[in-house]
Amino acid sequence: MSINATREDENQSLVSKKDTIIRLFRYLLKYRATIAIVIFIMLVTVAISILNPLLIERAVDVHIANRDKNGLLKLIAFSIGINLIFIILVKVRMYLMAKMSNEVLVTIRQELYTHIQSLSFSFFDSRPTGKILARIIGDVNSLKQVLSDSVTTLIPDFVTICAVVVIMLIKNWKLALASLISLPLLFLGIWFIETRAHLRWRDFRKKSSNLNAFIHEDLSGMKVIQSFAAEKETGEDFDELLNEHRGSFIRAILINDAFFSVIDISWGLGSIAMFYVAINILGVGVDNVGTLISFGMFIGMFWRPIMNLSNFYNKLITNISGAERIFEILDTKPEITDAGDVIEMPDIEGEVRFDHVTFAYDKDTSVLNDVSFKVKPGETIALVGPTGAGKTTVVNLISRFYDVQEGNVYIDDYNVKDVSIESLRKQMGIMTQDNFLFSGTIKENIRYGNLDASDEEVIAAAKAVNAHDFIMKLENGYDTKLKERGGGLSIGQRQLLAFARTMVSMPKILILDEATSSIDTHTELLVQQGIEALLKGRTSFVIAHRLSTISKADRIFVIDQGKILEEGSSEELLAKKGLYYDLYMAQFKNI
């Protein structure tokens, strides 16, 4: 099995990290009140933290030095009281931030999922499902810690650093400067690491996406893998992708861990410098032991927030690539959209007209070339021709899954570009050879075609396509729960349920794209009986390689080389002995 599609790294446009961070944090603006409460709580807790070293200094230099037992006990009681308040406030802050960050993640995930549903077929044609899934799940989850720490780390730690520096300078500027002597080393180290870390974490995200896409694809195709005894080859491909994923993580984490080494070295050098100045230059006596102890605590209070801020920055560098990947999809514009002046399409009769339509999926390959035809309401049109001739493209243009490059498509004299997409597609029933069923009951799957359908309408649709009898033989009838993709049912049964789902929508235009390809001949005869009744009064387009299924079509369009080469009933086309005749004879010559 080839892994080229899943192994190929996704192209990402380079975006300023600053712009990405600002855009991400805009999601927090909705929670201004919560953030204000959290900031107030943090200012109180920061004040308590800064007060603790000063209390210890007073305890040592005043109460212990003067043997003031009562004063010391009062100071201890006061310290216990404010630190209990500190603990309670920290718990409240953690709860509020966890709640807010999770709500933001839900908002981002909903926005991303809703936007993905609006994207055109070309978006999904160019990306494996697993890579899309990686962005909705993994990339969004990666932002949780960043959003939470953005308020709980940035603000209190920045305030703490500023307050500690001010207090240290006021108490003893020489000790303060000695403590901060290693800051240039810190800034140089962080700059060196940051320039390399972001690229490595971006590469890791890409490798994670590749691995996720491969696993999703292989699990979906496990029956094929086992059928061809390809487990060994697939396992080797998986190991290769896994090694790439692991290697990218190791390269990223190695540079990541260097952050903390730089901080530890800077912290140590600052502490050594402070004690050296205190002992050898200023001198330490009995009267100022408390001051030295408090300075030692202040050094910890200075460097610990820097470590927290560096850890936050490290997380930001680690996970900002996830935000970039999310915003890249959010910035992807749907190719098929409603214009600003579209109207709602009224109930239609079902006339379809192609007016000199030319279409290509890419610039190099034209699929339809100057195609024109008109279909009357209630007419059944069969589309036949070689694989790749453009049959499915015709019906995709009717539903406006793609836009034509030249010409126009009209329904009841409405240009499909001039009406809203929703009002257009709601009047169509589309049945493809991909008989996808969702997890849920049979009734829910059929009702998916019309969410307002009653139980009676669901049953009527099932009876129309002769699915009712086999449904009633199941253990719970219409309430039978289906496994993923309809597991446990035969291919034919799944096809019949998909037929019923399309039929319950009661469309004005019906599109059957190889819809009976997976049904055996006997079942197909039963389905045809139901379809004939449902086709009455509806315009329908039927694509089928099995020519026996389209013999009763009003007209047959023979499509090849991007054009309609022949048109007429089955009898008329056979009499011409043209391309349709050749297709017919090739299919039935051995019968």
Image: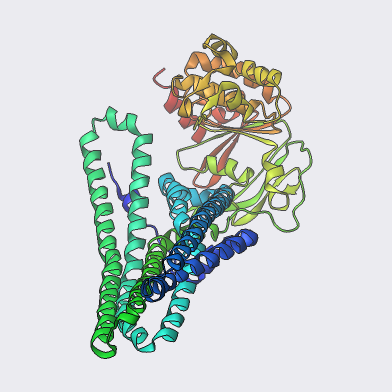
Q: Is residue 114 visible to us here?
A: yes
Q: Quadrant of the C terminus?
A: top left
Q: For residue 193, which quarter of the picture?
A: bottom left
Q: Residue 60: percent from the left, percent from the top?
A: 37, 72
Which residue is drawn at the image coordinates 55% and 21% (left, top)?
A: 496
Q: For residue 236, which quarter of the picture?
A: top left
Q: Is residue 22 left or right of residue 220?
A: right
Residue in the foreground of this view, choosing between 407 and 22: 22
Q: Residue 521: percent from the left, percent from the top?
A: 48, 16
Q: For residue 62, which quarter of the picture?
A: bottom left
* Marker count (numbered): 0
Note whether 484 is above or below 374 in the view shown.
Answer: above
Which residue is drawn at the image coordinates 50% and 63% (left, top)?
A: 78
Which residue is drawn at the image coordinates 76% and 42% (left, top)?
A: 412
Residue in the foreground of this view, choosing between 93 and 260: 93
Q: Is residue 571 visible to us here?
A: no
Note whether 110 is above or below 274 in the view shown.
Answer: above
Looking at this view, name the residue that lies furthest to the right.
346
Residue in the foreground of this view, choosing between 232 and 514: 232
Residue in the foreground of this view, choosing between 516 and 31: 31
Q: Residue 586: percent from the left, percent from the top?
A: 42, 27
Q: Residue 174: percent from the left, percent from the top?
A: 35, 89
The coloring applied to the image is rainbow
Q: Quadrant of the N terminus?
A: top left
Note whether 209 is above or below 511 in the view shown.
Answer: below
Q: Is residue 137 left or right of residue 303?
A: right
